[in-house]
Amino acid sequence: MDRLEAMKVFVTALDEGSLAGAGRRLGRSPAAVSRAIAFLEQHVGAELLHRTTRTIKLSEAGERYAAACRRVLVELEEADLSAAGERAAPRGVLTITAPPISGEEILRPIITAYLDAFPAVSVNLVLLDRHANLVEEGIDIALRVAELPDSSMVAVRVGGDVKRVVAASPRYLAAHPRISEPADLVKHSIVTTTHMGHDTWVFPPSPGSSIARSVHFKPRFLVNSVRAALGAAVDGHGVTRLYTYHVAERVQDGSLTLLLRGAEAPGMPVHFVLPHGRLSMPKVRAFVDFALPRLRAEFARLSAEAGAMGS
């Protein structure tokens, strides 16, 4: 059996979550999929997958081998496309990751328009509240809202001026003490998300100081969903901290009021992040070229609305 073909079967099984799923996607019988993986296990001399009747789980050796397989297959595809040059049209499966809200509400309409423009491409959109390992998880493009550390990844600036903002409903504010500075938050019920801080929110130094202001609290409601935190705040259950694009609509309709505008940290940039060399793939290059102007326009609109919120 061809080892590269067996690697493709192995990676597809991981992506689909089962041998049967890999068989359906590749048009092969489950027995053929199982033989391909057994061939790889015999070749490397180690068990790669723990199998049950319905699920598969990577072994420790399998985790390392899967990451290597993904790198080999991506580099092979890049080499093929580089040789094909301009004759290579966008095609295949494009895997994109993004945070849940920006992925659903901002990126998703752009993706569906891209699919209309490039019918030979399919998109797998993975919504995550964490930074995925792009190479090991087989991801082509990540949309990230953050200052980026130095890395081997390629970053393409989208734009944006996304800020962390504090908000509460008018009903909640009418029944609780006034919030004039970050320290006042300790008197309040806090609705927080896991990625904004389990028990601490950090604000920039006050004027004339160089020490950041940390507010420690015991949350009244801690949740790993932005939508849940937003809903709890709108319903009057406490003060929350989210990104500007999370709360913009609710501030515009009066469901939430922004607080501590003078204590906001500078806005964070928005980037596309890609593994090195991925831009040479036509499906990736076509998406970046297609999405960039649309995303820049959308984040510029959101930044303008954020600047007007609470003014």
Image (spheres, rainbow, N blue to C red):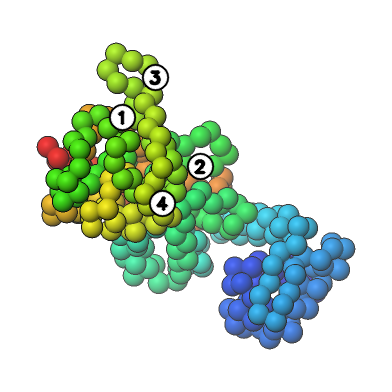
Residue 209 image position (x, y, % from top left): 33, 15
Q: Quadrant of the C terminus?
A: top left
Residue 223 image position (x, y, % from top left): 41, 54
Residue placed under numbered mark 3 in the picture: 211
Q: Are marks 4 and 1 in contact (CB under 8 Å)?
A: no
Q: Is residue 195 left or right of residue 243?
A: right
Q: Quadrant of the N terminus?
A: bottom right
- Residue at the location (34% across, 70% down)? 116
Q: Is residue 142 left or right of residue 212?
A: right
Relative vertical location of residue 76 with respect to residue 119 in this rendering, above or below: above
Residue placed under numbered mark 4 in the picture: 222
Q: CA distance from mark 1 to mark 3?
A: 14 Å
Residue placed under numbered mark 2 in the picture: 154
Q: CA distance from mark 3 to mark 2?
A: 33 Å
Looking at the image, tell me whether mark 4 or mark 1 is earlier in sequence order.
1
Q: Is residue 60 left or right of residue 149?
A: right
- Residue at the location (24% across, 44% down)? 167
Q: Secondary structure at mark 4?
A: strand
Relative vertical location of residue 111 with respect to residue 256 in this rendering, above or below: below
- Which mark's residue is nearer the viewer, 3 or 2? 3
Q: CA distance from mark 4 to mark 2?
A: 34 Å
- Which mark's residue is nearer the viewer, 1 or 3? 1
Q: Quadrant of residue 260?
A: top left
Looking at the image, tell me whether mark 2 or mark 1 is earlier in sequence order.
2
- Asked whether residue 144 is in view, the answer is no
Residue placed under numbered mark 1 in the picture: 183
Three-letter amino acid code of the residue under disc 1: Ala
Q: CA distance from mark 2 to mark 1?
A: 39 Å
- Asked whether residue 59 is in view, the answer is yes
Q: Nearer the viewer, residue 146 or 12?
A: 146
Q: Are marks 4 and 3 in contact (CB under 8 Å)?
A: no
Q: CA distance from mark 4 to mark 1?
A: 20 Å
